[in-house]
């Protein structure tokens, strides 16, 4: 049972994606005004999330869950 929990935790770890940071501001009288900061990250979903939410894998996920539940 502990192995199953460890495997599920490993599959649910977030992946690291590329992040971009940009900031813009106006300078008036040596002071920053209208400062805007944007931080955007594009991350891929983990296999565990994809397995349960993608229509391609929905039936497989359901059957796997039922199989495990039935054999407990």
Image (cartoon, rainbow, N blue to C red):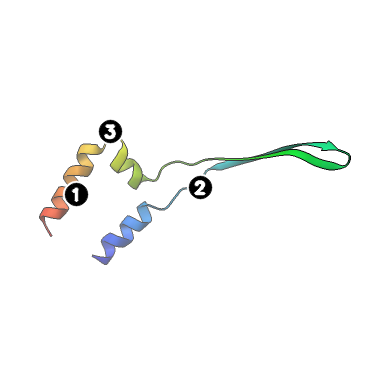
Q: Is residue 54 left or right of residue 43?
A: left
Residue 18 vertical placement versus 7 (above, below): above
Q: Where does label 1 land, which residue?
A: 65
Helix, strand or loop at label 1? It is helix
Residue 53 on image: x %, y %: 31, 39
Quarter of the figure that contains the N terminus: bottom left
Q: In the picture, residue 62 is in which quadrant?
A: top left
Q: In the picture, residue 9 is in which quadrant?
A: bottom left
- Give the mark nearest the N terminus, 3 or 1: 3
The disc label shown at residue 55, or none: 3
Residue 2 vertical placement versus 65 (above, below): below
Q: Residue at x 35, y 44 (%)?
A: 49
Q: CA distance from mark 1 to mark 2?
A: 28 Å
Give the crowd class for mark 3: few <14, some 14-19, many >=20 residues within 10 Å. Answer: few
Q: Is residue 23 left or right of residue 40?
A: right
Q: Nearer the viewer, mark 1 or mark 2?
A: 1
Residue 33 vertical placement versus 69 (above, below): above
Quarter of the figure that contains the C terminus: bottom left
Q: Tags 3 and 1 in contact by the CB under 8 Å rule?
A: no
Q: Residue at x 39, y 46 (%)?
A: 46
Helix, strand or loop at label 2? It is loop
Residue 66 on image: x %, y %: 15, 48
Q: Where does label 2 land, which residue?
A: 16
Give the crowd class for mark 1: few <14, some 14-19, many >=20 residues within 10 Å. Answer: few
Q: Nearer the viewer, mark 2 or mark 3?
A: 3
Give the crowd class for mark 2: few <14, some 14-19, many >=20 residues within 10 Å. Answer: few
Q: Residue at x 16, y 44 (%)?
A: 63
Q: Is residue 12 left or right of residue 17?
A: left
Q: In the picture, residue 71 is in which quadrant?
A: bottom left
- Give the mark nearest the N terminus, 2 or 3: 2
């Amino acid at each position: 049972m502990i192995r199953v929990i460890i495997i599920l935790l490993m599959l649910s770890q977030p992946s690291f994606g590329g992040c971009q940071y940009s900031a813009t501001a106006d300078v008036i009288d040596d002071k920053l005004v209208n400062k805007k900061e944007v931080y955007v990250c594009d991350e891929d979903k983990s296999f565990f999330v994809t397995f349960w939410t993608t229509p391609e894998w929905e039936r497989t996920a359901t059957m796997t869950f039922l199989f495990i539940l039935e054999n407990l």
